[in-house]
Amino acid sequence: MEILEQIAKEAEANTQVPAYRRSVEKVIAAVMSSSNFWRIVDLSDEPLPLVAEILKLLNKRDLVAFEGTQILLTEAGAELAKKAGIEPFASHRCPTCKGRSVVIDELKSAYEKFLKIQENRPPAIHQYDQGYVTPENTFARVALADDRGDLRGKNVIVLGDDDLMSIALALTGLPAKVTILEIDERLVNFIKEVSEEYNLNIDARVHDLREPLPEDVVGAYDTFFTDPPETVEAIKAFVGRGVATLKGERCAGYFGVTRRESSLDKWSRIQKVLLDMGLVITDLLHNFNEYVNWDYYQEMRGWQLTPVKEPPKDIWYRSTQFRVETVRGFKGFNDPIVGDIYNDAESSTT
Ligand code: N4P
């Protein structure tokens, strides 16, 4: 299908986001599955700016129609899909674990406390690209890390904690020690208050992760958690800092990487950065993380790009959960970071 390749080429030229025939096929398949823009981005698993551009190019060729807030395949679009052999998405995700591979089970009582505590959490703010995962999701991360043997009796550090991982971890009583470094004073204060009230002994400190780590945390932990902004630089900095906190070989790190703001070409660069640090990717769980919709959507770049204007209602922003382990010769990254760590051509929620 010549036209699919043409659209990919044009979309890439207009957005600077790598686009393939398969990207266009996925957007068409997503439109066959849903008429909602956010769901189309979610299903297609291509960066939002690219999805928006492909939809506009399909619309220009009368293959897709915008009707009010609905995005629909036209008759010509349906015909093209048929000829190209494009079919709607099918899902076979496990309904029990939602594809995460773990369930909360014995952690239930800690989880119930967490559900109540997080009701008073500070709202996500634009300034630091915040957007937190559901409380169930936060606990699923705890379950995953415990399943992999990374929590019991271990020193655990969280780099940036709008997900309140530190509270979830400490509530289980499993780690020997929980530290967080977080730029946002509101979060640090909230975590400190909860820690005091529930006797959690969390070591919570205000710290800008663009700066090198405080000396006492370097080489002192067994396991780290982080959820970086999506530029390669930010991932290198956040994960690199995480690695610098680790005691040695065969220690673990957890972080999310999304498809919403990162093409597979960017993913390839990210994976190279990980390998170069002496990390091995042991687990990679697609759509493990689901982010509660944040209030500042009208201020984010993606809102300008949407072909129809409808606020997101259901969760659409997801990310893949990575687990990495250090091997012989590993090396963290603790240099200062200058410049914009939040924005590149593929970012859309910053
Ligand atoms: C972004 C979420 N801009 C949503 C709003 N990001 C970090 C939030 C930390 N929980 C990036 C997520 C994937 N790395």
Image: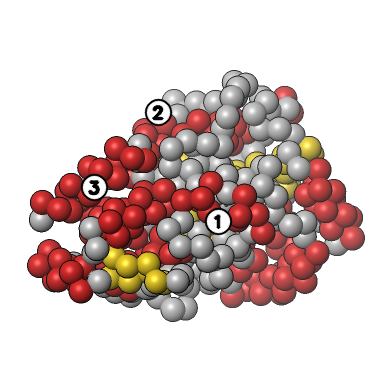
The answer to whether 163 is drawn above or below residue 75 in the figure is: above
Q: How many marks?
A: 3
The disc, 3 or 1, on the residue closer to the chain's N-terminal end is 3
**Type of amino acid at the residue the image marks with label 2:** Asp
What label sits on residue 276 in the rendered view?
Answer: 2
- Name the residue located 77 percent from the left edge and 68 percent from the top edge: 119
Residue 245 visible to the viewer: yes
Q: Is mark 2 within 8 Å of ligand 1?
A: no
- Name the residue located 79 percent from the left edge and 39 percent from the top edge: 205
**Type of amino acid at the residue the image marks with label 3:** Ala
Instruction: Please provide percent x and percent y for residue 142.
Output: 60, 60
- Which of discs 2 and 3 lies nearer the camera? The answer is 3
- Name the residue located 43 percent from the left edge and 37 percent from the top edge: 345
Q: Quadrant of residue 291?
A: bottom right
The residue at which mark 3 appears reads as: 8
CA distance separating discs 1 and 2: 23 Å
The disc, 1 or 2, on the residue closer to the chain's N-terminal end is 1
Q: Is mark 3 within 8 Å of ligand 1?
A: no
What label sits on residue 110 in the rendered view?
Answer: none
Q: Quadrant of residue 195?
A: bottom right
**Type of amino acid at the residue the image marks with label 1:** Ala
What label sits on residue 145 in the rendered view?
Answer: 1
Residue 231 in the figure: left or right of residue 166: left
Q: Are marks 3 and 1 in contact (CB under 8 Å)?
A: no
Instruction: Please provide percent x and percent y for residue 39.
Output: 43, 67
Q: Secondary structure at mark 1?
A: helix
Instruction: Please provide percent x and percent y for residue 179.
Output: 73, 43
Residue 178 in the figure: left or right of residue 23: right
Residue 5 in the figure: left or right of residue 312: left
